[in-house]
Image: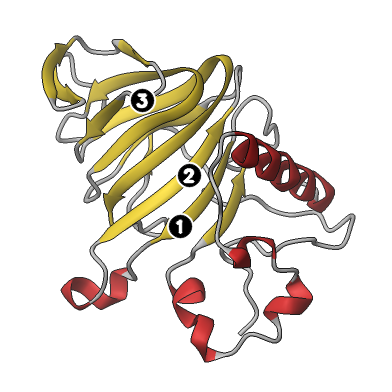
Amino acid sequence: MKRSEINGYIERALVIFSHSNYALPAWATFTPAEWKTKGASCNEIRDCALGWDITDFGKGNFEKEGLTLFTLRNGNPADGANGKTYCEKLMISYPGQITPMHFHWKKMEDIINRSGGKLAIQLWKATPDEKFSDESFEVKIDGIARTLKPGEIVRLSPGESICLTPYLYHKFWAEGEACVVGEVSKVNDDNNDNRFYEELGRFPEIIEDHPAKYCLCNEYPF
């Protein structure tokens, strides 16, 4: 992705979050120059990869396959039970933009449609060898159990949520208009706990065509 694109998508996200009445922490808009002045007091932000995450999953077509994320809080996987054991994110999913099929080996997560259009999620149970299973499976939507067929699509209206357990393949996209999507989960570990159905890159390669306005979650200066 080009740095100018990343800058633009963050600016777009700031407007959408503001219009949806989701306030971000003050450091969300720190510039790279400001981050260089921040010392050890901000290490939790750095160590737990909090903040902006704009990804095209290595596909080079963000509008078709991509996701905007802002991690508000997270534990450090290296801390285990001695650290935070939970994570919270805000995400933006756009119509026509897919978050590719994946599951997590360890993380259980609630995906919440916070506002906007419908959030469509397609699901499959994974087999022991990590293929698509032909078995039905159970999920809970706002705490209510529901049995789904392989590949079934669930559509969440604003305010609705689904609990996704480990080894449950899922991909999602917005319908009608952009969705502000919440995630409440166990600790998020993007380096070791994402199993994409096809081989993908979790973070984009960046072409520096313009100075960065903001730091991404894996770019903070120490």
Density class for disc 3 (Cα within 10 Å; few <14, some 14-19, many ≥20) is: few
Q: Which residue is mark 2?
A: 90
Residue 65, percent from left and from top: 59, 29
Percent position (x, y) of residue 196? 40, 38
How far apart are labels 3 and 1 at the CA level? 19 Å
Point out the frontmost of discs 3 and 1: 3
Q: Which residue, given by chain and number where applicable, does mark 1 sit on?
A: 72
Mark 2 and mark 3 lie on one chain; the one further toward the N terminus is 2
Q: Residue furthest bottom?
A: 40
- Of the residues under marks 3 and 1, which one precedes in the sequence? 1
The spot of residue 35 in percent (x, y) is 68, 78
- Picture residue at 42% right of the left edge, 69% below the top: 48
Q: Amino acid at mark 2?
A: Leu
Foreground of the two, 194 or 20: 20
Q: Quadrant of residue 212?
A: bottom right
Left or right: 193 as drawn, with respect to 208: left
Q: Secondary structure at mark 2?
A: strand
Q: In terms of depth relative to the viewer, which is nearer, 154 or 42? A: 42
Q: Which residue is mark 3?
A: 159
